[in-house]
Image: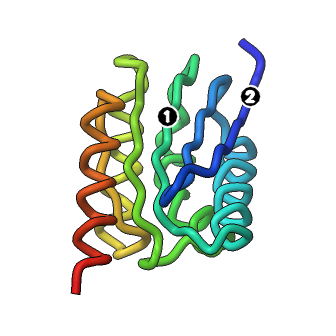
Amino acid sequence: MSNSLVITPQDNYLHVVIKGNSSYENAAYLWRTIADACNQHNCFYVLGEQDMSNAISTIDAWNHQTIFAEAGITAKFVIAWVDKNPKTFEHTEFIRTVLANRDIGYGKLFSDVEKAKNWLLEKIASKSTP
């Protein structure tokens, strides 16, 4: 499976679709690219969909705290992330737990795109109401 990353600006969030192989280098590139796109569009709401062929190693999952810090992912980012591959979901869940325990980014992991999108739109709506 070759790697692909597509970021599409929507009305009030960025839609990220990634496919390919998991590695520390690919994850670092992904999050730098997402952070750059968010800063460029001044939009820090992200709906991500991943379909990776392999799970990232446990140590690389643990090191996502470094990846996020180096990419500039902070608490202002709201991330609804979907892992479509049941074989990699547990590792992605571990990454989310590591980041949540360190208050890095704000997000939730899903296995269903519609549920993730609805959660993200609720966060956007609640932020814009006075």
Q: Please name whichever residue, 118 or 54, is drawn nearer the observer in this view of the structure.
A: 118
| Above-or-below relation of 86 to 7 | above
The residue labelled by disc 1 is: 49
* Marks 1 and 2, how far apart at CA: 12 Å
Taking the spot 41% from the left edge, 50% from the top edge, the residue there is: 95
Quarter of the image containing the C terminus? bottom left
The residue labelled by disc 2 is: 4
Q: Position of residue 63 (x, y in %)?
A: 54, 58
Q: Position of residue 102 (x, y in %)?
A: 36, 74
Q: Amino acid at mark 2?
A: Ser
**In the figure, residue 85 lies in which quadrant?**
top left
Chain-order first, disc 1 or disc 2: 2
Say whether residue 36 is left or right of residue 127. right
Q: Please name whichever residue, 42 or 66, is drawn nearer the observer in this view of the structure.
A: 42
**In the figure, residue 34 lies in which quadrant?**
bottom right
Q: Position of residue 108 (x, y in %)?
A: 30, 52
